[in-house]
Amino acid sequence: MVDLNYSPVPLLDNIDEEIMKQFVINSIISVFLTGALFLSNTLADSDNNKLRIELDGEYLTAEISNMPIIDVLKKISEVCGAEVFVDASIQNNTISANIHSLPVEKAVKRIVSPYSSVAVFAQRTNSKGDKELFISDIKVYESSSGGSNVQYVNVSKSAQTEHKSQVYQSPFRVPPPVPGVHAKGSYAEKAQKRINEKMIESRIKKIAYMRSKASMEENRVRKDITRLKIELSRAPIEDRRELSSELSAKTRELYNLQKRNITRIQNEERILRQLQARQH
């Protein structure tokens, strides 16, 4: 006979208390792991796109990961205060670099590698009244182009404000005249002239140093040749063959040294003549 007074026991009452505790603990762990995984992915994405550039005096430190060149160069321009131009064909390519306390010019070359870069120096008077050099312009371009026949985009903050989307065929020529800005005798033209003068002065000093160094190197070898000739004249017959061989090697060394030095100095002198012609 069926007992009509039967009342079902709630399901929860039948669940073992330990099982219930384990269920709750597992749920909490699951939520925690899901959150940790999400945070980890977020941080990983952040690490995959990193851009930190700091200037300490004349030294640059940078942490860059998978950033477009144009964004990196905008930051460099902002930090260093230089006008920065980038080859329009590579501006959206990504680069990565990690450098610590390098001079600005060397740092930029490392940062934009495998692309090429050139820095132009100008002169200014510091707060102490002393003359000093600073980087006024930087250009970055595809190495295979050699920097010629390239369209450059000025990524500097001033250019974005004043000349949006302006493209230059060459960043180191004065852009198309703007009344009162790039007219003949303007600040831009005078600044370029001062830059050329400083480059000429620097090139003259470099040539003088190269001549002095070449003379010291050649005189050192000449002294060795003179010594070997004296030793050869006094040496017994059995030792003369070895001394003759050394003398021939030193003579060849002097010839190659002179040839190399002449070529290098002539190249520098050719560049100097081009700079001087540009001034007139």
Image: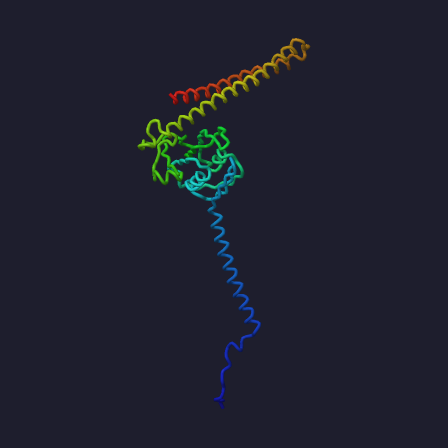
Residue 269 picture quarter:
top left
Left or right: where 14 falls relative to 78: right
* Quadrant of the image containing the C terminus: top left
Identify which residue, 5 or 170, lies in the foreground. Answer: 170
Provide residue 149's location: percent of width, then percent of height. Answer: 36, 30
In this figure, what is the number of numbered marks?
0
Q: Residue furthest left?
A: 179
Q: As drawn, is 255 to the left or to the right of 200?
A: right
Q: Where is residue 83 in the image (x, y as percent from the top left)?
A: 41, 35
| Residue 274 picture location, percent across and down | 41, 21
In the foreground, 223 or 203: 203
At x 44% / y 37%, what residue is drawn? 81
The image quarter in which residue 227 lies: top right
* Viewer-closest of 136 and 127: 127
Which residue shows up at 50% across the image and 39% down it? 55
Query: Farthest residue in the bottom direction?
Result: 1
Give how far across and how far down residue 187 sits, in percent. Answer: 37, 30
Residue at left 49%, top 88%? 5
211 versus 117 height, above or below: above
Q: How is the image coloured?
A: rainbow
